[in-house]
Amino acid sequence: MTRTALYPGTFDPLTNGHLDIIGRAVKLVDRLIIGVAINAAKQPLFTLEERVEMIRSQAAQFGDSTLIEVQPFEGLLMHFAEQVGAQSIVRGLRAVSDFEYEFQMVAMNQQLNDDIETVFLMADPRHQAISSRLVKEIASLGGEVSAFVPPAIKVRLKERLA
């Protein structure tokens, strides 16, 4: 049986923290679906198509032994997980505040489908402070984001915010 996990997020933009979680998740599964959430309420800086393309480009470096697919999704996470045949959902944790939110989400998701497990991967200490929201804020104020995003994403951010 193919072990399939789903790593969901908005990835606006993709950060080094996201890439760290992807790189570690591929060690655990045969197939990793990176689910790019359609969430207009978050008012993303990048379009859905741009986010999908950036993730595909950057995640390609991890696809040696694991099949990596990048797919947009809208609606309930658990419905999407069922649709793609995921047995687990991968989530990255940076801080205690992440845990409190994720703890609630797991409890609700288990009520929807208790066959799908959630696996938490602790962020590498170098990436614990990184969030897409803060990266966008730093970049929009002319700050240096090289430590937080891959070079290609940095270029895209500068172009978008110019």
Image: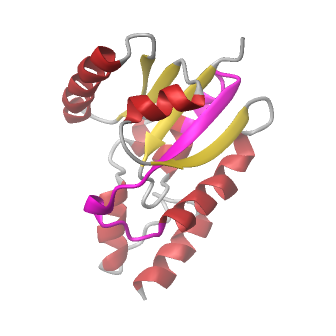
The answer to whether residue 43 is magenta is yes
Q: Nearer the viewer, residue 133 or 45?
A: 45
Residue at the spot x=59%, y=54% of the render?
Answer: 55
Quick check: 12 above or below 95?
Answer: below
Quick check: 71 above or below 97?
Answer: below
Residue at the spot x=44%, y=67% of the render?
Answer: 145
Residue at the spot x=50%, y=20% of the render?
Answer: 88
Residue at the spot x=74%, y=30% of the render?
Answer: 66
Residue 43 x/y as whole percent: 30, 67
For this view, does 61 lie left or right of residue 28?
A: right
Quadrant in the rendering for residue 76? top left
Please provide the residue range marked out in magenta. 22-47
The answer to whether residue 156 is magenta is no
View extreme (right): residue: 64
Quick check: 65 above or below 60?
Answer: above
Q: Nearer the viewer, residue 136 or 110?
A: 110
For this view, does 77 lie left or right of residue 33?
A: left
For this view, does 22 lie left or right of residue 160?
A: right
In which quadrant is the N terminus drawn?
top right
Quadrant in the rendering for residue 27? top right
For this view, does 144 lie left or right of residue 94?
A: right
Figure coloring: secondary structure
Residue 67 x/y as whole percent: 74, 34
Residue 30 x/y as whole percent: 71, 23
Q: How many marks?
A: 0
Residue 130 x/y as whole percent: 36, 50
In which quadrant is the C terminus drawn?
bottom left
